[in-house]
C-alpha cells in the first residue's frame, strides 16, 4: 500500500513547517503528497508565494504530487492556461479533477500526465464517457474525498462498494485518514474519508484502510506528529492486503507466543463459528502443546485459541472466535483481539492473510 501526506500552503502553517514535514515523510519512505489549489479559506497570496518552494523540495525527493484543481486554479497560480505542460513545469505530477471539467479535457490530460478521479462521486456513465473519449487509463487512478465536518464522512459499505467497483475496472483507489494531533483549519475536526475513522488513531485507521483494500492511504490533515507519520509508514510496509490486528497474550508459553506472532492465512473453507488459520498446525515441527491454565475457559468473540494435545491431530490449530461458547480442556485460550480492533475481524475472509501484533 502506498502512503501519502497532505500540504495546504496558505492555510495557517508556515512554509518552514510544510518543508520540514516533506523532509520527514521522505525519510520514512512516504511517496505521495496531496494538496488542494482551491480551498476557499486559503490565503491566496501566501499560497502563490510558498507553493513553488514546496513543489521544488517535493520534486527533489521524487514525490508524486497530487493537486486538486478547479477552474479557479489557473487564476490562483497566475498561469496563462491550465495545461499539463504548465502543471508539470510547477512540479505537479498528478492532477485531480473534481468539478467543472468535461471528460474530453480529462481524457486529453491523461495522455500527457497522471490524472486522478474522485472515487467518492464517480459513476459508471462517467467512466464510460472517459473510455469513449479515449482516455489513457494507464495514467488514471482515483482518490476518495475527505469530509471536514463531523457526521458528513462516508459510510463503510459505500466506500467498500465504490472501491471494489473501481478496482474491478483496473483503477487503483486511495482514501484519507485523519490526524489526532495536528488537525487542519478551519474546523480542526479531522479530514477522514470514513466517518468511523474520524477519531481513530492513524495506526488503526491506516490498518482499516489496508483491510478495505485501499491502494493508497493519505493523512488528510496537515500537521501529523512524528508518531503518526511512523505509524503511516509502518502500514505502508505491510504486505499488500494483509490485515493486522492488535491483541493481548494470555498464554505464558514462549512457543505459543512465537506461533501466534507469525503471519497466517484464513482457510478457504470458512467455519461457521471461528476463523481457522491454514498454516498453524504445520508449524509445530514436533512440538507438543500441553493444556494450560487458559484451557477450559469460556471463549468470547475475538478470542484466539490454540488446540492442545487433547485434540490429537488438530493440535496447534489457531482459531479466532466469531461467537461466545463454552471452552473445553482440549483448547487453550491463548490471547484476545483488543475490543477496539474487533471491527477488523470480518475482513478476514477466506484466503485472506492476517497477522496478530501483540501489545502489553
Image (cartoon, rainbow, N blue to C red):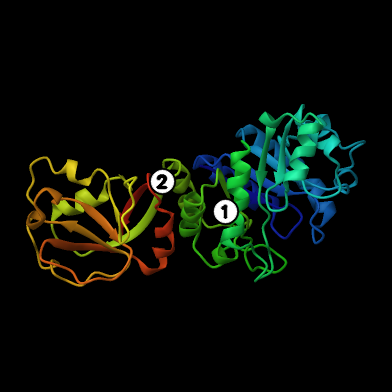
Which residue is nearer to you in this view: 43 or 332?
Answer: 332
The quadrant of the rendering that contains the C terminus is: bottom left
Q: Quadrant of residue 307?
A: bottom left
Q: Is residue 231 left or right of residue 73?
A: left
Where residue 193 sits in the image (x, y, percent)? Answer: 62, 58
Q: Residue at x 91, y 46 (%)?
A: 75
Mark 2 crowd level (few <14, some 14–19, many ≥20, 10 Å Cα): many
Task: State the mark number for residue 126.
Answer: none
Q: Residue at x 81, y 57 (%)?
A: 43
Q: Quadrant of residue 245?
A: bottom left
Question: Mark 2 near mark 1, Cβ–Cβ under 8 Å?
Answer: no
Where residue 249 sits in the image (x, y, percent)? Answer: 23, 62
**Mark 1: secondary structure:** helix
Q: Is residue 20 visible?
A: no
| Residue behind mark 2 | 242
Which residue is nearer to you in this view: 141 or 4?
Answer: 141
Task: For marks 2 and 1, give the CA distance.
Answer: 16 Å
Q: Mark 2 vs mark 1: which is more N-terminal? A: 1
Which residue is nearer to you in this view: 193 or 85?
Answer: 193
Q: Is residue 190 left or right of residue 123?
A: left
**Mark 2: secondary structure:** loop
Q: Is residue 285 visible?
A: yes
Which residue is nearer to you in this view: 258 or 171?
Answer: 171
| Residue behind mark 1 | 160
Q: Nearer the viewer, mark 2 or mark 1?
A: 1
Where residue 323 sits in the image (x, y, percent)? Answer: 32, 68
Mark 1 crowd level (few <14, some 14–19, many ≥20, 10 Å Cα): some
Image mark count: 2
Q: Residue furthest right?
A: 80
Q: Is residue 197 left or right of residue 18?
A: left
Q: Is residue 49 left or right of residue 295?
A: right
Where residue 244 sits in the image (x, y, percent)? Answer: 39, 52
Amino acid at each position: 500500500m502506498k502512503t501519502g501526506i497532505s500540504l495546504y500552503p496558505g492555510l495557517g502553517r508556515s512554509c518552514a513547517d510544510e518543508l520540514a514535514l516533506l523532509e520527514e515523510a521522505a525519510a520514512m519512505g512516504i511517496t505521495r503528497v496531496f494538496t488542494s489549489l482551491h480551498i476557499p479559506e486559503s490565503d491566496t497570496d501566501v499560497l502563490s508565494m510558498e507553493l513553488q518552494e514546496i513543489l521544488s523540495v517535493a520534486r527533489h525527493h521524487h514525490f508524486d504530487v497530487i493537486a486538486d484543481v478547479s477552474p479557479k486554479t489557473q487564476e490562483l497560480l497566475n498561469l496563462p492556461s491550465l495545461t499539463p505542460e504548465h502543471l508539470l513545469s510547477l512540479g505537479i505530477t498528478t492532477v485531480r479533477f473534481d468539478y467543472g471539467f468535461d471528460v474530453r479535457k480529462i481524457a486529453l490530460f491523461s495522455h500527457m500526465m497522471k490524472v486522478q478521479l474522485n472515487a467518492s462521486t464517480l459513476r459508471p456513465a462517467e467512466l464510460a464517457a472517459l473510455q469513449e473519449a479515449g482516455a489513457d487509463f494507464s495514467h488514471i487512478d482515483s482518490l476518495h474525498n475527505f469530509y471536514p465536518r463531523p457526521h458528513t464522512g462516508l459510510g463503510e459499505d459505500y466506500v467498500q462498494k465504490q472501491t471494489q467497483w473501481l478496482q474491478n475496472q483496473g483503477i487503483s483507489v486511495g482514501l484519507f485518514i485523519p490526524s489526532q494531533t495536528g488537525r487542519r483549519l478551519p474546523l480542526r475536526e479531522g479530514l477522514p474519508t470514513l466517518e468511523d475513522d474520524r477519531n481513530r488513531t492513524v495506526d488503526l485507521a491506516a490498518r482499516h484502510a489496508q483491510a478495505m483494500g485501499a491502494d493508497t492511504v493519505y493523512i488528510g490533515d496537515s500537521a501529523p506528529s512524528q508518531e503518526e507519520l511512523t505509524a503511516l509508514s509502518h502500514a505502508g510496509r505491510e504486505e499488500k492486503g494483509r490485515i493486522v490486528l492488535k491483541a493481548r497474550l494470555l498464554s505464558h508459553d514462549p512457543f505459543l507466543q512465537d506461533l501466534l506472532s507469525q503471519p497466517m492465512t484464513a482457510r478457504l473453507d470458512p467455519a461457521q463459528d471461528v476463523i481457522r488459520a491454514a498454516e498453524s498446525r504445520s508449524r509445530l515441527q514436533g512440538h507438543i502443546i500441553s493444556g494450560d491454565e487458559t484451557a477450559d475457559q469460556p471463549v468470547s468473540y475475538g478470542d484466539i485459541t490454540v488446540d492442545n494435545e487433547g485434540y490429537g491431530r488438530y493440535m496447534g490449530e489457531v482459531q479466532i472466535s466469531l461467537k461466545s461458547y463454552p471452552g473445553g480442556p482440549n483448547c487453550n485460550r491463548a490471547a484476545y483481539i483488543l475490543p477496539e480492533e474487533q471491527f477488523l475481524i470480518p475482513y478476514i475472509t477466506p484466503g485472506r492473510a492476517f497477522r496478530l501484533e501483540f501489545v502489553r
